[in-house]
Amino acid sequence: MGLFSFLKKAGSNIFKSAETKAAEAAEEAAARKEQQLIALRGVVDGLGLPIEDLDLDVADDVVTVYGQTESQADKEKIILALGNVAGIATVDDRISVVTPAPEATFYEVKSGDSLSKIAKAHYGDAMKYPVIFEANKPMLSDPDKIYPGQVLRIPVLED
């Protein structure tokens, strides 16, 4: 048998250095973060709500949102749209509001809930469900299409 010669830098690279592995992992993480930011920006843009200077940052399951809106309702809708994305557990709100108003209550939908049941619990009147439906447009397209774990805005009723 004897000695066989091979090109040192050719073939399967199973001996990657720790630095090379770390650099590749960092590149993959940066690409994943960029994809997340693009997708989250698409969620906000898809709402069609006016927000100036929108900026997002994502770290693990936390998204930080910056910008300025005219109304408290628009701010809350943006927060809810981002928070209702699978994989996002927390929204760090850094949005400023030009015309402040009372904050709505956020409610997590439970199994067996309906908008009328939620309206009865929060307003004392099941027939006020359209108020909740309207407060959650455009995230909701149908009052019967809510799901457990979804978070909804329950606005303060105006007299």
Image (cartoon, rainbow, N blue to C red):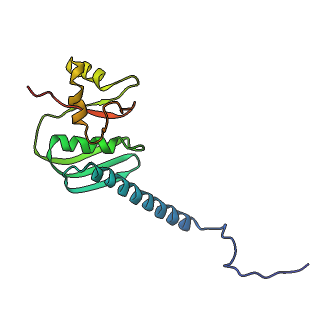
Position in image of residue 55 (x %, y %) = 26, 56
Q: Is residue 46 above or below residue 121?
A: below
Residue at 36% x, 46% y: name it: 62
Q: Please report the residue visible at 41 percent of the width from the left and 43 percent of the height from the top.
A: 86
| The N terminus, quarter of image | bottom right
Residue at the farthest top position: 124
Where is residue 112? Give x, y as percent: 39, 22
Quadrant of the frame with the C terminus: top left
| Nearer to me, 125 or 75 | 125
At 36% from the left and 56% from the top, the residue drawn is 37
- 103 with respect to 44 (left or right): left
- Indicate the quadrant where residue 5 lies: bottom right
In the figure, residue 135 lies in which quadrant? top left
Q: Is residue 131 left or right of residue 159?
A: right
Q: Residue at x 59, y 68 (%)?
A: 17
Depth check, front residue: 147 or 105: 147
Q: Nearer the viewer, residue 144 or 50?
A: 144
Q: x, y percentage for residue 18?
A: 57, 64
Residue 134 x/y as whole percent: 22, 35
Above or below, 17 against 90 in this view is below
